[in-house]
């Protein structure tokens, strides 16, 4: 009789109230006389630091809506309003929400309806980010500002692109935020966000060490639901408290030898590439867990500033500091997100986390992440003998997620790992 594997999830329930509070405060912002910005890409921090301006991170909202089980209903509203199903589901989600507001259509859960924004900020890593800002601007007349965030092809491109992006933020974005909010951008606010955020990221990195252990003490899925305190809720005291509690749980598990998978730990340690399937986290892990397979690392969740020691809240130019973290800092988010720097990043993660196999999530919504996936798999398999497969799907649109396809490809990967172990 085979081993009966069972997941032993970490207690991440503390993230729920934190996330609910974030979106509740955004829903109440207009009642308090604040202006609201919707931001795609990592530029919301400039709105956060400006008095009288509340900001919403569009990918964060998609994860929230998907986690609430409301994505399909809002996506259906977008389709009724005229959106094509093949476009970015994050784009359609926001169009659907706007249509619900403007048309007065009923919605099952009012918590996923946000106030109409006063400003759209497109930090354009991929074409879809500018497309859905342009679409909302054209249909609803909301002011939009697009900042190009080029993904670097070569290491030597990074300083030049960093200078270009910094100029855009200073010359275009911050003046627009100030004009819409009626307030001056506050550098000290931004420094204070950085100070608290840096402390939280340092504790987060201590938690990552428990994923490197064999057996692992938690899973990448546990970390996935814990990203919000690091990114769009950055700088809030409760975010720091959340990770302090998370670390305490992991240290207790280490002391008592409690693995993430019962009875004796995982059989397969997997790498996950691409965005997390926010609306289907349970569906995916239930297809892995019974086999003793767990994801322990991935390029997307590890893009959130893996080198917090390099964050400098006291930098002379705090506006530039954020762009530096994206480009020339060791964090290098804008290099690792592309297929060129991405392969280098994946190789390091595979070694650091002792990975047995790779799952590459190919999403119709985030085509940037799909670039080079097959080539990365082929190169790594040739170099290290680690097999990988591509899973097709979407982060929030259930019409694009096939359970049979997911199950078949996961099982094929695990069988390949077994064959190579013999």
Image (cartoon, grey):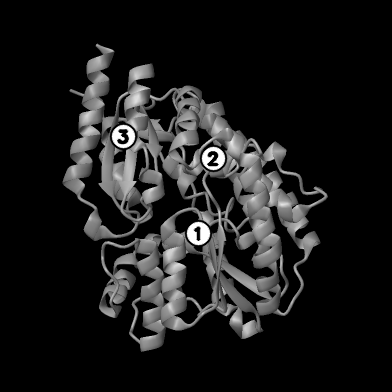
Look at 32% across and 52% down and name the residue there: 280
Q: Quadrant of the C terminus?
A: top left
- Measured as percent of width and height from the top left, residue 293 is found at 32, 31
Q: CA distance from mark 2 to mark 1?
A: 31 Å
The residue that label 2 is drawn on is 335
- Measured as percent of width and height from the top left, residue 99 is found at 37, 81
Q: Quadrant of the N terminus?
A: top left
Q: Residues within 10 Å of mark 3 (few under 14, many from 20)?
A: few
Q: Visible in this render: residue 111? A: yes
Q: CA distance from mark 3 to mark 1?
A: 36 Å
Is residue 381 placed above or below 102 in the rendered structure? above
The tag earlier along the polypeptide, 2 or 3, is 2
Is residue 277 placed above or below 93 in the rendered structure? above
Between 170 and 287, the one lying in front of the other is 170
The residue that label 3 is drawn on is 374
Q: Are marks 3 and 1 in contact (CB under 8 Å)?
A: no
The residue that label 1 is drawn on is 16
Callout 1: helix, strand or loop? helix
The tag earlier along the polypeptide, 2 or 1, is 1
| Relative side of 105 to 149, left or right | left
Q: Quadrant of residue 104?
A: bottom left
Is residue 126 placed above or below 33 in the rendered structure? above
Q: Are marks 2 and 3 in contact (CB under 8 Å)?
A: no
Between 179 and 102, the one lying in front of the other is 179
Look at 44% across and 82% down and name the residue there: 140
Q: Visible in this render: residue 276? A: no
């Amino acid at each position: 009789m085979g081993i009966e594997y069972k997941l032993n999830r970490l207690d991440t329930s503390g993230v729920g109230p934190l996330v609910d509070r974030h979106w509740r405060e955004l829903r109440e912002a207009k009642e308090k006389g604040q202006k609201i910005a919707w931001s795609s890409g990592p530029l919301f921090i400039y709105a956060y630091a400006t008095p009288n301006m509340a900001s919403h991170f569009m990918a964060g909202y998609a994860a929230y809506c998907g986690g609430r089980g409301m994505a399909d209903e809002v996506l259906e509203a977008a389709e009724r309003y005229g959106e094509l199903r093949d476009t970015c589901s994050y784009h359609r989600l926001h169009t659907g929400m706007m249509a619900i507001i403007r048309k007065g259509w009923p919605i099952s859960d009012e918590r996923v309806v946000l106030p109409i924004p006063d400003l759209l900020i497109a930090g354009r890593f991929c074409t879809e980010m500018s497309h859905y800002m342009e679409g909302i601007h054209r249909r609803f007349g909301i002011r939009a500002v697009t900042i190009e965030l080029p993904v670097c092809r070569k290491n030597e491109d990074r300083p030049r692109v960093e200078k270009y992006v910094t100029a855009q933020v200073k010359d275009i974005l911050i003046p627009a935020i100030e004009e819409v909010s009626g307030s001056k951008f506050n550098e000290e606010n931004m420094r204070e966000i950085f100070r608290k955020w840096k402390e939280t990221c340092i504790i987060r990195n201590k938690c990552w060490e428990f994923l490197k252990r064999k057996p692992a003490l938690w899973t990448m899925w546990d970390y996935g639901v814990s990203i919000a305190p690091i990114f769009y809720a950055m700088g809030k005291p409760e975010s720091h408290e959340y990770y302090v509690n998370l670390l305490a749980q992991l240290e207790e598990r280490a002391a008592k030898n409690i693995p993430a998978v019962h009875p004796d730990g995982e059989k397969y340690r997997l790498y996950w590439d691409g965005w997390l399937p926010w609306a289907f986290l349970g569906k995916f892990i239930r297809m892995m867990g019974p086999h003793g397979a767990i994801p322990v690392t991935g390029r997307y969740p590890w893009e959130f500033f893996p080198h917090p020691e390099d964050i400098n809240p006291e930098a002379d130019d705090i506006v530039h500091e954020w762009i530096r973290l994206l480009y020339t800092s060791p964090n290098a988010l804008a290099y690792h997100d592309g297929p060129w720097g991405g392969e280098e990043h994946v190789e390091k993660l595979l070694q650091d986390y002792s990975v047995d196999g790779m799952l590459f999530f190919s999403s119709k919504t985030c085509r940037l992440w799909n670039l080079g996936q097959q080539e990365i798999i082929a190169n790594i398999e040739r170099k290290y003998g680690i097999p990988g497969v591509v899973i097709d799907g979407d982060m929030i649109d259930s019409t694009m997620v096939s359970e049979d396809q997911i199950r078949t490809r996961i099982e094929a990967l695990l069988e390949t790992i077994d064959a190579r172990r013999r």
